[in-house]
Each structure stands twice: as structure tokens, then as C-alpha cells.
Amino acid sequence: MLKFIHITDTHLVGRNEALYGTDPSWRLKACVEDIRAAHADAAFCIITGDLADRGGKATYEIMKEILAPLPMPVHLMVGNHDSREDLRAVFKGAFDDGNGFVQGKLETAQGVFLMLDTIEPFRHEGVFCERRAAWLAQALAESGQKPVYLCQHHPPFPVGIAGDDRLSILDSKPFVDAVTPHWNRIRHMFFGHIHRPISGSWRGMPFSTLFGTNHQTALELTPYLSVEKALAEPDDTVWGSPEAPHYGVVLITEELVVVHQRSFLTGPQRFKL
């Protein structure tokens, strides 16, 4: 069995600085401490973007310091609040697909994890251009018949929250074209950006995402699942929520992909029933 940790949307700011009334650094430290106490046997950890709230080398230095106690490798991805250049200046081993994008692959006994870059500087909506899609298509072809897991920041589909659906990958055709020949081998998509625990399937592909470690998006649902209708909404507000954060504990075998959600600010984690 493969076990790994999924964290997303840490949104770090300056040291001891608050964001929406809470300290993202303190919360990430609490998350790290809980992982060390309860899930130190995980093979690796993936953080699916929005590592920093405003980029900045100093912020990534704080993240490096906070993540250092984790006993497993940590694989970092970029979100729309991140800076590729600042990230690479601090994390020298960050993914690089050779075209300047933070993309890469991770081989495991249960298949290949493909880490995708869905950001465009100075834009909050997701972008997945032809160059990135070409890298993805090649990586999928090179993976042979192995199971595949996709990891990225933005989803390529709507989730029914208009404020977030305006900021998904608005043009998903390059992505769809790259994955279509391999659709039956893609076992799961892990993403961030939404700041809510959501799971389901897209054209038969299972997916999941999580709360962020600092602040959340409110469950303000729209009566449709359409990016086009979301873009036509007159109010582009994204509503926040004070719900408690968590991280994901993922278990994978040849037959199963199971995603658990672990709270880390709620005190004792168990009692007899």
C-alpha cells in the first residue's frame, strides 16, 4: 500500500503576520506537527499550490523552515498566488519541465504521479497552454500502461461555486486533448484552489480536493455546473468561511484509492465510542 499526504493552499505571508484573522505560518506548523505525530510513515507529501499568498523569497524561506521537520520528501506545486522564480530561488529541487513550468513526475510502486503547472503570472484563473499540454501528453505516453495520478492547483471543470468556477481552467481543451488517449489509466486527480473538501468524478475520472490550511471558501452553491454561466454572473465575489482546516491522508492499492481528511486543530483525535 502507498500512503501519502495531500496539503493545499497554505497561503503563507510574513512571519507572525495574519491573513483573514489567522496566522498561516502557525497553522502550517500545527499541520506539520500533526503529520509527524500521526502519519510519519507516509511515503511523501504533496502541496498543491498557493504556497505563499503573495509570492516572495522570504515567504518561501519561512515555508522551508516550517516543512523541514517532516520525515518524508515534500513535493511543491504552484498556484495563482505563487511566483515560480521566487519558489525556485529557495527550493532548488522544485519541478522543472525544461520549458520554465513547475511540472514533473514522481514514480511510485502504485503508478506515476504527474505534477502540473496551471498558473499564468498576474492572473487568478487557471491556464493550461499547448506547451504544458505537450509535456503532459509526452509524460503520459512515456508512462506506458502504468496507473496515473494527476496533481495540480486549478481544476479543469466547474464545481458549482460561481466565484471559484470563474477561476478554474477556463480553456480546458489542451488538457482534455492530452489526457483523452490515456483516460482509462488516470486513477485520480488531486487539486487545490477551491478551499473546500470536494470529491466526485469528471467524465468518469475520480477527483478530490481539500480545505486549505488557513482559510476556506464558503459553500455558496449556484444552481448550475457551468463555467460559462459563472462568467456571466454580475457578482464575482468569492465568499470566505472560518471553517477549520485539515489535510488529506491518501491510501492507494492496486484496487483502491482512499482519501481521508484529517483535522489538526481540534485537540485529541480519538476517544472510545
Image (spheres, rainbow, N blue to C red):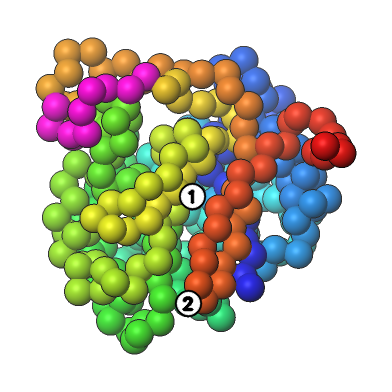
Residue under pointer 2: 111
* Amino acid under disc 2: Gly
Q: Position of residue 125 (x, y in %)?
A: 27, 37
Q: Residues within 10 Å of mark 1 (few under 14, many from 20)?
A: many
Q: Which mark is residue 113?
A: none
In the rendered structure, which segment of residues is drawn in magenta?
220-229
What distance separates the C-alpha of mark 2 from that of mark 1? 19 Å
- The quadrant the C terminus occupies is top right
Left or right, residue 248 beside residue 167: right
Q: Which residue is drawn at the image coordinates 40% and 52% (left, top)? A: 207
Given residues 257 and 152, the one toward you in this image is 257
Residue 167 on image: x %, y %: 28, 34
> Is residue 71 shown left or right of residue 162?
right
Identify the residue at image location x=75%, y=56%.
Answer: 39
Name the quadrant containing residue 122.
top left
Residue under the image location 14 percent in, 27 percent down: 229
Task: Answer above or below: position of 151 versus 247.
Answer: below
The answer to if 222 sits in the magenta stretch is yes
Residue 97 image position (x, y, % from top left): 37, 69
- Secondary structure mostly seen in magenta is loop
Which residue in the protein does label 1 denote?
48
